Amino acid sequence: MKKHMNKIVFFSFFVLITIIACSEDDNIDTTAPGILSNLSTTPINGGGIINYTLPSDNDILYVKAVYTNSLGDEVFKVSSKYNTSIEINGLNQATPIKVKLYVIDESENVSKATEVEFTPLKSFIFLVQESINITPDLGGVKITWENIASKTVFVYVHVIDDGEEIIRILSSSSPQENIFIRGLAAKELTFSTKVEDFDGNITELEEKGKFTPLFEEKIDKSTWTLIANQSINGNAYEGRTVNFWDDVVDTVDTDADNSYFIITRDNNGGSLNFPLDIVIDLNKNVKIQRFKVWQRAFWYNGGGVTYHYQEENLKTFDLYASNDAQTWNLLGQFDIGDPRDAAGNIPTEAFQEAIEGHEFSLPNTSEQFRYLKFSITSNYGSTQITVGSEITLYGLDNL
């Protein structure tokens, strides 16, 4: 009897669930939304913008545009219900393209297609290629271009050196780009470029000309002297301000090379008032385009632990140049960066960068100058001490 009652209860429950399910099925929206109206198109470089009016349905989710791109692949773009336009891009053609547009509602019902046709303007990758300009610079060349679309481009630079080819790939979405290629010999080289967009469209490789990079050298530091009356006092404990350019880079493993400056608040009026200036007379004229800066590395009682990125090390700084030590020209503002995570962990590659020296490039090769001001604007948190190990300049020496 008990088993019979259980069967009755189970059957009743099954019937109830079936009734509810059927009721829910009856409420499912299967009505397709209306179509787009008032369609118009505006061609752009490498694509087009389609404007439209949405149908009156109150459950529209998005609009979907389907088309075949210039590489022959069927692709689609979507635009939310809050928009009244959709951008079609990634095209590399001067022929008309047909685009089908659909309205999709919250129940995933799809409207009938509406179709538009337009002819894209010349792709921006060709405009980038046409705008590329190469000029010789110290140790390499400077490459500039314009990107009116502000979309990501990949610029392939092919360099021919005595029959050997090297390829550098540069990437940017900036409307105006200025990039240096370093490490090139000071002899005539042949440069060619091609440009690719994010969708795989690419221009033909085009020779841009023959250029000879300017000779670059490490600026000799044996003539440098400190202008003490314009500089912070970095002489504390084993530290000396002049250690900043003694060609000895502090390392982690030993205190035998502990070459760095130590700026303390006690030696400088009781507080670290940033900026902390170190002013150097090079006693000659130079031009520079890049430089390296090293942090202090050795940590007393650190048990082999590196001192890089610790709170006393310099972090940000400004660099100035002058020909009279009175009127200063800002060469740039620089930041070593902070690779520490929330737990204080530092990636291996960040340590390697610190060991090899943090390299910075100026926007352009400097004008000729004699005096250098290294102006520290922050450290990694200490209010008592700021330290740093070495600076090296690269450019044209003893002009």
Image: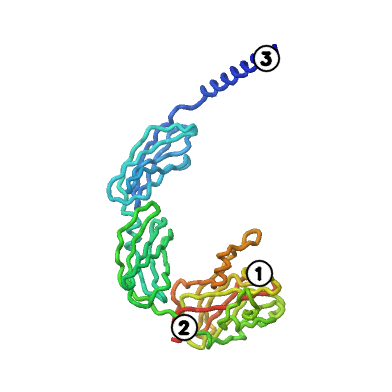
Viewer-side residue, 317 vs 36: 317
Residue found at x 41% / y 70%: 181
Residue 202 at x, y percent in the picture: 34, 56
Decide which of tag 1 and tag 3 comes sooner along the chain. Answer: 3
Tell me the residue that label 3 is attached to: 3
Which class describes the residues within 10 Å of circle 1: few (<14), some (14-19), or many (20+)? few
Q: Mark 3, residues whose alpha carbon is within 10 Å: few (<14), some, or many (≥20)?
A: few
Q: Nearer the viewer, residue 257 or 202?
A: 257
Residue that appears at 44% across and 42% down: 79
Residue 359 lies, in percent from the top left, at: 51, 72
Q: Which residue is mark 2?
A: 286
- At 60% across and 19% down in the image, what residue appears? 14
Is residue 335 among what the camera can see?
no
Find out whether the residues at labels 1 and 3 contact each other: C-beta distance under 8 Å: no
Q: Alpha carbon of mark 3 to alpha carbon of mark 2: how far?
A: 101 Å
Look at label 1 and name its amino acid.
Answer: Val
Q: Are marks 2 and 1 in contact (CB under 8 Å)?
A: no
Q: Amino acid at mark 2?
A: Val
Query: Horizontal and vertical percent for residue 151?
Result: 41, 55
Q: Are marks 3 and 2 in contact (CB under 8 Å)?
A: no
How packed mark 2 is, by other alpha carbons closer than 10 Å (few <14, some 14-19, many 20 or more), is many
Q: Amino acid at mark 3?
A: Lys
Q: Report the side of 232 relative to 188 (left or right).
A: right
Side (left or right) of 16 relative to 82: right
Q: Quadrant of residue 64?
A: top left
Marks 2/1: CA–CA distance: 38 Å
The front one of 345 and 58 is 345
Discs 1/3, front:
3
Find numbered disc 2 in the image and state the secondary structure of the residue it sits on: strand
Q: Which mark is residue 305?
A: 1
Please state if 10 lies on the left or on the right of 171 as rendered: right
Pick the residue in front: 319 or 211.
211
